[in-house]
Amino acid sequence: MEIVYVHLNSRIPIHLFLNLRRSRKLFPSQKITLISNMNQNVPKGIKLELFTKTEEWFEVEDRLKHPKNFRNNFWMTSLGRFLALADYQNRINEPILHVESDVIVSKDFPLNIFEYTVSKISYPILSNERGIASILFLPNKDSSNKLLEQLHTSSLMDPYTSDMLILGNLYKQSNEVLPLPIGPKGAENYRDFLPDALLESWENDLDKFGGIFDGWDVGGFFFGTDPRNARGRSFLQRDVPSEFSNIRSWKINYSKDREFINLEFNDVSIPIYCLHLTSKQLGLFKVNLPKKRIDKLLKIRETEYSKFYYRIFFNQVLISLLRRIRTWLR
């Protein structure tokens, strides 16, 4: 099995470079690959696999009506990852664990459980409509091809589809998906509209994996939203009523033993195996996570609050200016 990251249409950002280096140190004997459609400077020990856009890529791209000038064609590249993953898996025909660029994993991440006991496409489900590829396990090339079928079906039916909607549709329309457990047992930890069958599945697989997988609930709530979406401002402890998790009622602690974070429930510590750092705070992409900083962020407040990142703000302003200049020059 390989751990695979995907980054398309631009040079890899600093947080991804740090994340690749972090994963290499945590798993020195594990195959780790970055798929990109351009040459990249990657940390030592990371394999770079080049992906060439196919006719299939351009067919899907033509169907979509999202703005193509947004973040290097963000909407297409986010779901285009599925094309790149399928292309690669069809060549190697081995299990793939895809990790998003801003997701960090724990040193005790259950790689062996995925490789030897999981036979279905696996990822977290966030709501009635959306799944997420924060962690996406593809056991074989048939599974990645199944994902491509859903990509084509969804893009034909909805020109404004996204990678998250595609994963949501695949879960609803197929029995070939294992929804990774995202929280503790018990309906009281979720919204009233959580389907009973999904809760039962989560509870069964929580026993199997011995821990949970952050789709974005923990990372987005406690560590902040992506500051690029609000000109440098990241919102923390913001409730998302459309999602299943009643995250404000959860208690999260830093674990010295695991050097990662746990969910505390009924006097039991439940390992969290990955953390989706949508805020992309560079200081968190380290092997040894900063305990004091994390402890401070994990304290529940009564209402949401925000942080401002000047570096992100000025970078976004520069990108906007360059885009306007290019438009004017045309």
Image: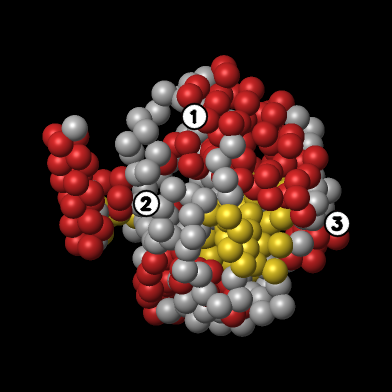
* Circle 1 or circle 2, nearest the eye: 1
Q: Quadrant of the C terminus?
A: top left
Measuring from the top left, give residue 296's x and y in whole percent. Answer: 37, 71
Which mark identifies residue 225? Answer: 2
First reached walking from the N terminus: tag 1 or tag 3:
1
Which of 6 and 314 lies nearest the eye of the viewer? 6
Q: Is residue 227 visible?
A: yes
Q: Residue at x 37, y 51 (%)?
A: 225
Distance CA(mark 1)–CA(mark 3): 36 Å
Q: Is residue 287 above or below residue 91?
A: below
The answer to whether 126 appears left or right of 108 in the picture is left
In the image, what residue occupies the spot 59% across and 31% down?
Answer: 55
Q: Which residue is mark 3?
A: 117
Spot occupied by residue 259 in the image (x, y as percentages of width and height): 56, 79
Mark 1, Cα crowd under 10 Å, few <14 / some 14-19 / many 20+, is many
Image quadrant where residue 148 sits: top right
Query: What's the mark number on residue 61?
Result: 1
In the rendered view, would you say 255 is above or below 94?
Answer: below
Indicate left or right for 60 with 233 as reference: right
Q: Nearer the viewer, residue 138 or 72?
A: 72
